[in-house]
Amino acid sequence: MKIKSVAVLGAGAVGSYVIWGLSQKPEVRLGVIAEGERADRLRKNGCAINGRIYHPEVWSPEKAHNVDLLVVALKYGLLEGTLKSIQKTTGGHTVVMSLMNGVDSEEIIERTEGTEHVLPALIKALEEKNDGKFNYTGNQKPIIEITVNENAVIHFELWPEIAPIACGSVMQLAEKKIFDGRAIERLEPGFVLQPLFFDGVDPQIDIMVEPEFKTNPENAKIVFERGIVAMAGDPENSSGSQYYITLAASERLNGNFTVIGKVIDGWDEIERLEHVEVEEAIEPQSGFVYHRPVKTEMITKVRCIK
């Protein structure tokens, strides 16, 4: 079968790699599957890949129905919540190819689509790491300064001795001003404050790194108490950008996420944020329910000051 149309579900790092490659194939009609706010954002901003903006078509699952090839490039933890979208997209001759982490992603998709639609595959790409930019090797504890709404400041120290890769990634993104000018996306009173959450559009942010809570026993030993700073992720990966601050002790986090440091001051601002009004929100692809501030709380800038 000749592939004439391709839909990509998940426009993060792996999905963007596919978009970049197929954008150079004018004979292939290419679209990204998205709904709601994410679809609007993709139509407006496109996908930033290696400093260039790409504007693939944006399709709902219904519009993408019966596409020749469906590339599933989601984070593993989102797969179960998107099976209905995959089912709506898959037509009689659609081939579904999973490029996800997780050894059973194809088996999960086969539950709804059948083995005849699923093509076993893997992706192999090189990630350039120059001068240790994803691996901090200094002998000091760097300090990250977060400015909220232009005037309030929160400081946390990084612990690169137990998480050099994740700390290096956060420092690099701060240096590049990638965190600047973004509204706080997730706020769970009594649990976590997470500035970035489920972006899935900008590959500058959708970065996955080695899960150092698995590779470094000292990291896994850290007890999650109030003020611990850690990285979001799933059992197989750790985010290189989506850091969060714990607002209370949480045993269920212990040993399951990469710890990168701890808040050292700025508690007045954290306590203020804990008491702002929040509203329920739903991550459109997975159906995950979370909370976010009703009134915009802006991360003006994030810098490494030491």
Image (cartoon, helix red, strand yellow):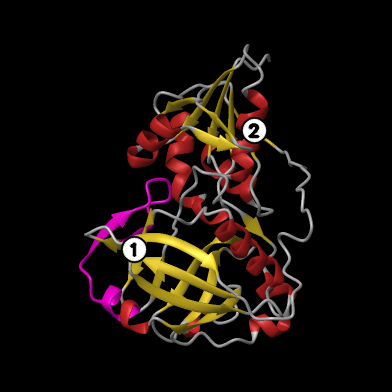
**Residue 216: x percent and y percent?**
73, 78
Which residue is the site of mark 1? Answer: 150
How many neighbours does mark 2 have within 10 angstroms: few (below 14), some (14-19), or many (20 or more)? some
The region drawn magenta spans: 270-291
At label 2, the amino acid type is Val
Quadrant where the image shows the N terminus: top right
The correct choice, above or below, for 93 with respect to 60 in the image is above
Q: Is residue 59 visible?
A: yes
Q: Measuring 33% from the left and 68% from the top, which residue is drawn there?
A: 151
Disc number placed over residue 18 in the picture, else none = 2
**Quadrant of the rendered image containing residue 259:** bottom right
Disc number placed over residue 253 in the picture, else none = none
**Residue 171: x percent and y percent?**
61, 64
**Residue 10: x percent and y percent?**
53, 41
**Residue 187: x percent and y percent?**
34, 67
Q: Say if the magenta span includes residue 288.
A: yes
Sequence-wise first label, 2 or 1:
2
Quadrant where the image shows the C terminus: bottom right
The correct choice, above or below, for 53 with respect to 142 in the image is above
